[in-house]
Image (cartoon, helix red, strand yellow):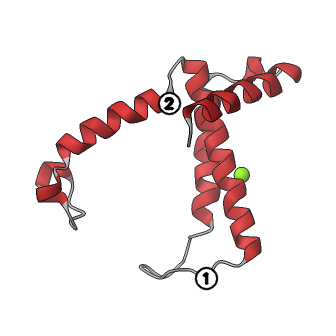
């Protein structure tokens, strides 16, 4: 995902909110609540799926999953904007820290938490 497309999305989401007078509702708390709900809606698609099973996803299911992923992304991008955080920069920095916490030679093929590697 190109960073400029994310910046473009951020601007379109801000315009969407401004046009509707919704900025007043986009507090960090409200956006975190909305994000949590959307993550739960995404998770719901996998609820009760047998552990380890690869679900068969038909076209409708894919569209529903795409809708929920879009909702999650929209709220993450909106929240980051309200908080003045560049999500790509934050993710880049986090990835560097994760690489240090999970060195390939110890973490490869291993789902153990870094503190127990
Ligand atoms: Mg949703």
For the point 19% across and 44% down, the residue is 101
Query: In the figure, 10 relative to 59: above or below?
Result: above
For the point 76% across and 28% down, the residue is 12
Give the residue at the far right of this rendering: 20
How far from the left and from the top, in percent, is residue 94? 33, 35
Mark number displayed over residue 3: none
Instruction: Give the quadrant of residue 35.
Output: top right
Q: Under tag 1, what secondary structure?
A: loop
For the point 50% across and 30% down, the residue is 87
Query: In the figure, 106 relative to 72: above or below?
Result: below
Mark count: 2
Instruction: Tell whether 91 sits left or right of 97.
Output: right
Q: Return the disc, 2 or 1, that comes first in the chain's sequence.
A: 1
| Residue labelled with disc 1 | 56
Q: Under tag 2, what secondary structure?
A: helix
| Residue labelled with disc 2 | 87
Q: Quadrant of the N terminus?
A: top right
Q: Is residue 25 visible?
A: yes
Q: Is residue 34 visible?
A: no
How far from the left and from the top, in percent, is residue 111? 25, 63
Instruction: Tell whether 90 sits left or right of 32.
Output: left
C-alpha distance separating marks 2 and 1: 32 Å
């Amino acid at each position: 995902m190109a960073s400029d497309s994310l910046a473009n999305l951020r601007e379109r989401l801000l315009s969407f909110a401004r046009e509707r007078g919704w900025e007043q509702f986009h507090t960090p708390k409200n956006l975190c609540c909305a994000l949590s709900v959307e993550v739960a809606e995404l998770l719901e698609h996998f609820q009760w799926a047998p552990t380890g099973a690869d679900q068969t996803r038909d076209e409708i299911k894919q569209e529903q999953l795409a809708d929920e992923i879009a909702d999650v992304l929209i709220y993450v991008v909106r929240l980051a904007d309200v908080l003045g955080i560049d999500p790509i920069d934050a993710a880049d920095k986090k990835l560097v820290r994760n690489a240090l916490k999970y060195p390939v030679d110890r973490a490869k093929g291993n789902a153990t938490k870094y503190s127990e590697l």
